[in-house]
Amino acid sequence: MQTNAPSFYEKVYKVVRCIPPGKVSSYGRIAAMLGHPNAARAVGYALSALRRPDENGYTSANVPWQRVVNSQGRISIRHREATANKQAEMLRSEGVKVDENGRIDLSIHLWLGLHLIELDDILRDEPTDHR
DNA sequence: ATGGTGACTCGCG
DNA sequence: GCGCGAGCCACCA
């Protein structure tokens, strides 16, 4: 039977797999989609753990980890330059524009999937008084 | 159980 | 726009 309730990491991997080529998301957004708006660091940690395959078989090879950047649209791997460069290359090959500083224009490439919270923002900004 | 770590984020100056 | 400090989280010894 299913004794394995999906761990936080596993959820992260599943969501990341939903990001289509040519698009990117941020650690914080992924966390928010999972109901933990402040667990951005945990998301980053989950992706770093991807370097080594886990029990469920998730690896850097089958999870598009490169499509996750920080909230500023910048590649966030500071202590692993080699990995950061690879991320930039992979993204470019997918059609994402990454400048020399590792910056990405989120207004173009941000993936908007699975966000239920923003609706709240929209409703508040534009009171539709149809009551 | 307690403490340290990290591919985060936000607010300030 | 950049550097700092503080808050937050899951995971591993």
Image (cartoon, coloured by chain):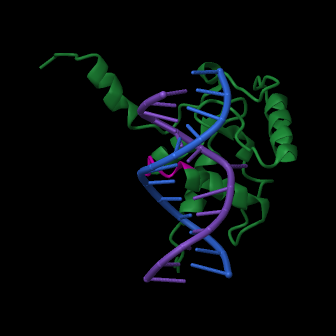
Chain colours: A green, B purple, C blue
Image coordinates of residue A20 in percent, x first then y, are 67, 36
Q: Residue furthest left?
A: A131
The answer to whether A32 is drawn above or below residue A12 in the figure is: above
Picture quarter with the C terminus of chain A: top left
Q: Nearer the viewer, residue B12 or A23?
A: B12
Q: How many marks?
A: 0
Q: Nearer the viewer, residue A22 or A28?
A: A28
The answer to whether A78 is drawn above or below residue A8 in the figure is: above
Q: Residue at x 72, y 29 (%)?
A: A22
> Is A71 a magenta residue?
no
Which region shows up in magenta? Answer: A35-40
Q: As drawn, is B10 to the left or to the right of A67?
A: left
Main SS of residues in magenta: loop
Q: As drawn, is A89 to the left or to the right of A11?
A: right
Q: Residue at x 64, y 58 (%)?
A: A46
Image coordinates of residue B8 in percent, x first then y, are 59, 44
> Is A38 a magenta residue?
yes
In the rendered image, which quarter is residue B3 located in? bottom right
Q: Nearer the viewer, residue A117 or B3?
A: B3
Q: Nearer the viewer, residue C12 or A65?
A: C12
In the rendered image, which quarter is residue C4 located in? top right
Image coordinates of residue A47 in percent, x first then y, are 68, 54
The answer to whether A35 is drawn above or below residue A54 in the figure is: above
Regarding residue A119, the answer to whether it shows in the image is yes
Regarding residue A35, the answer to whether it shows in the image is no
Q: Residue at x 58, y 34 (%)?
A: A71
